Amino acid sequence: MEKFRFLTSGESHGKCLTAIIEGVPAGVSIDTDFINSELKRRQQGYGRGGRMQIENDTVEITSGVRFGKTIGSPITLVVKNKDFENWQKIMSVSPDDSTDDKSFSVYRPGHADYAGSVKYNQTDLRNILERSSARKTAIEVAVGAVAKLLLKELNIEGKSEVLQIGKACCPDKFHQEIDTTKENGDSVGGKFVVVYKNLPIGLGSYVHWDRGIDGRLAQAVMSIPGIKVVEIGDNPLGFCGSEYHDEFALHDCKIERQTNHAGGIEGGITNGQDLVVSAVMKPIPTMLKPLKSVDLKTNEEAQAHYERSDVCAVESCSVVAESRIAWVLANEILLKYGGDCIEELKHNYFK
Ligand code: EPS
């Protein structure tokens, strides 16, 4: 069930990225500077490639907001691709501009190239790269920032932290790990955690398989490009029940817990503890050190395609995950508490 809906469009080197959001109550304060600061956070992180020197992502809001507040109508967000200036002919809509420049036909193992080209019957892998690119997460972060602004009205905030890059588990080793990887012409992934505090008890449900908030969060985070593992709370593998489950105690007649192995969800429902979601991002499949592959045009073995890319994007990915989680939480809050305007939502929420 969705209260909030959004669709995005846009290719990595196309003119712009666009989102239309429906379902945000009227009266939510929209701070454009905040959205832009989230976009900036996503662009940062050690190990990003040359593209991030070109882009300076900022949002343009073209509908749904008036004098700094939502008015209940669909909100349209646009983030321009500055790099489009260099790609106008290559990404042209017109058949008259058709060119092989920047087309490629050797699959990158681990990328969407192979399965995407078979699925969509494309021989120019550029047509797969452009939308499968993580560039689209820029507009998703803008959408997530709107969800975060709604959550802020209810005093709910989240943050993320990188836990591991490659084999390095200690933050002061992260840069060195990325530098070494880059020198080797390779790429590297890692692990991050997102924590949201001050959530109400009762978001999600156990009554149907698709109502569990853990499942919804897992889907939202797993579908970020490059994510291969999502965990809620501590990985229970190897724990006994008596070690893993979070015992209840009474303190001044209030229920308290000393541990939060469950990560804030029991039975597919938020339980009032901090929500803890962690995820593992695989190494980016575009590498200077090419892997063995096949050229779909010649049907001969070849070295995988390389073009400008990132060595590591784990920090950016953690910002994207914060946004996706904000979206899921905002949707669940609207499902539970309802409200066509912020006053109605706050009345229902705080009563
Ligand atoms: C990406 C390739 C790189 C990344 C890009 C994702 O872009 P380019 O091919 O233009 O150098 O920088 O990420 C972004 C553009 C971004 O905004 O995050 C890919 O192929 O997935």
Image (spheres, helix red, strand yellow):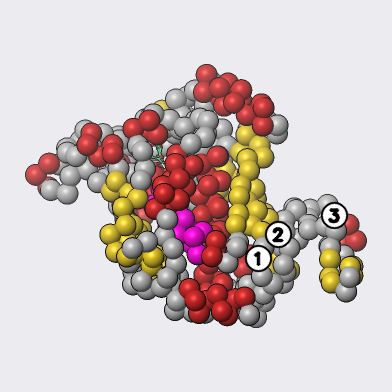
SS at mark 3? loop
Task: Residue under label 3, please give it.
Answer: 239
Q: Nearer the viewer, mark 2 or mark 3?
A: 2
Q: Which mark is residue 199?
A: 1
The image shows a total of numbered marks equal to 3
Q: 150 or 50: which is nearer to us?
A: 150
Which residue lies under the disc numbered 2? 274
Can residue 190 be seen in the rendering of this structure?
Answer: yes
Residues under labels 3 and 1: Cα distance?
27 Å
In percent of the image, x 45 and y 76: which residue is there?
A: 341
Please give the range of residues in magenta: 138-150
**CB atoms at circles 1 and 2 under 8 Å apart?**
yes
Q: Secondary structure at mark 2?
A: loop
Crowd tier of the residue under label 1, counting other residues whose Cα lies within 10 Å: few below 14, some 14–19, many 20 or above: many
The structure residue drawn at horizontal position 39% and vertical position 44%, both measured from the top left corner, is 135
Instruction: Look at the image and tell me in which quarter the C terminus lies.
Output: bottom right
Which callout, 3 or 1, points to the residue nearer the camera? 1
Pick whichever of labels 2 and 3 is earlier in the sequence: 3
163 relative position to 283: left or right: right
- Residue drawn at (39%, 53%) of the image: 32
59 vs 239, left or right, is left
